Amino acid sequence: MAAEGNAIDALGQFELKTALGPIGASVGFTQSNLHMIFAAVLIVGFMVYAMQRAAMVPGRMQSLAEATYGFIDSMVLSQIGPEGRRFFPFVFTLFMFILFGNMLGLFPYAFTFTSHITVTFALAMIVFVLITAVAIVLHGKKFFGYFMPEGAPMWLAPVIIPVEIVSYMSRPISLSVRLFANMMAGHVMLKVFATFVVMLAGLGAVGPFLSIMPLALNIALVAFEVLVAFLQAYVFAILTCIYLHDAVHLH
């Protein structure tokens, strides 16, 4: 976390770099892809390890796994209804992938792949395609009635329909930008204050004392980023459930 001169390179941490040497370079494999695979391995490993010796009186890891499972299960049921249980594996996987991706970026030398708009937009498009496909499969042509609420005057159709279409099409944009912007902003702040610590610590005898304030702020920011990492995964998952509710019930 060094600075060149007086400049603070807070955005350099988001630069994509080739991973796995020549093999990665030949296929465009970056540290972002590597951390996605690492996150997937950690999720599978966590669930397998936590539940391989399931007991009536659960240990810490089993309790954490069961609490996570129950948390997402209750979210799906409360937002979508009993019909939504079929979507539980998708929502659970989405939540865990985003959560682990957010958390990974808080470790030294790790990369936050959820801070890239291409990644978050790809996740949002998966959700968008799924909800659209579900709505069309379940309701057929009635799906297009979603853009004209029942009871609305027909003379307002030229206004209501375009507005509803734009609102529907903007879902992947709002989903992706919200996650990307929050994760990127948090890591920029961490880098800025961390750089302040290094710069102030090098000012001689008084340097270590001057660096105490930005160091304390950075510690507080790390704790705050842990909360943000969970909240952003939760927001992405619950909005997915809300969109699936609209697709299933068409209102």
Image: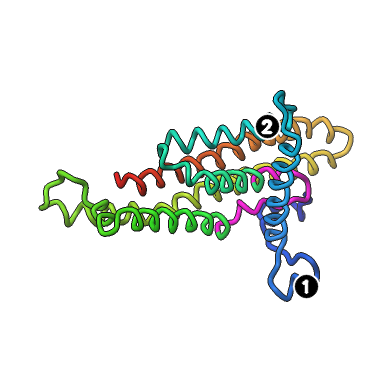
Q: Is 66 inside the magenta-drawn segment?
A: no
Residue at x 88%, y 38% (from the top left corner): 204
Location of residue 94 with respect to 212 vertically, above or below: below
Q: Is 106 inside the magenta-drawn segment?
A: yes
Location of residue 231 with respect to 29 vertically, above or below: above
Task: Specify the segment rendered in magenta.
Answer: 102-117
> Where is residue 99, by image quadrant?
top right
Location of residue 96 with respect to 64 vertically, above or below: below
Q: Sort mark 1 into few (<14), some (14-19) or many (20+) by Cα contacts within 10 Å.
A: few
User: Horizontal placement of 12 versus 73: left or right?
Assistant: right
Q: Residue furthest right?
A: 205
Q: Sort mark 2 into few (<14), some (14-19) or many (20+) by Cα contacts within 10 Å.
A: some
Residue 147 placed where, x, y %?
A: 25, 53
Quadrant (top left, top right, bottom left, bottom right) of the C terminus? top left
* CA–CA distance in space, label 1 to label 2: 38 Å
Q: Who comes first in sequence, dot 1 or dot 2?
A: 1
Which type of secondary structure does the marked residue at label 1 adopt?
helix
Q: Which mark is residue 111?
A: none
> Where is residue 231, by image quadrant?
top right
Residue 178 placed where, x, y %?
A: 50, 47
Q: Which residue is mark 1?
A: 23
Depth check, front residue: 177 or 71: 71
Q: Which residue is mark 2?
A: 64
Q: How is the image coloured?
A: rainbow
Q: Amino acid at mark 1?
A: Ile
User: Horizontal placement of 83 versus 61: left or right?
Assistant: left
Residue at x 78%, y 31% (from the top left corner): 212
Residue 8 visible, this angle: no
Q: Residue furthest bottom?
A: 26
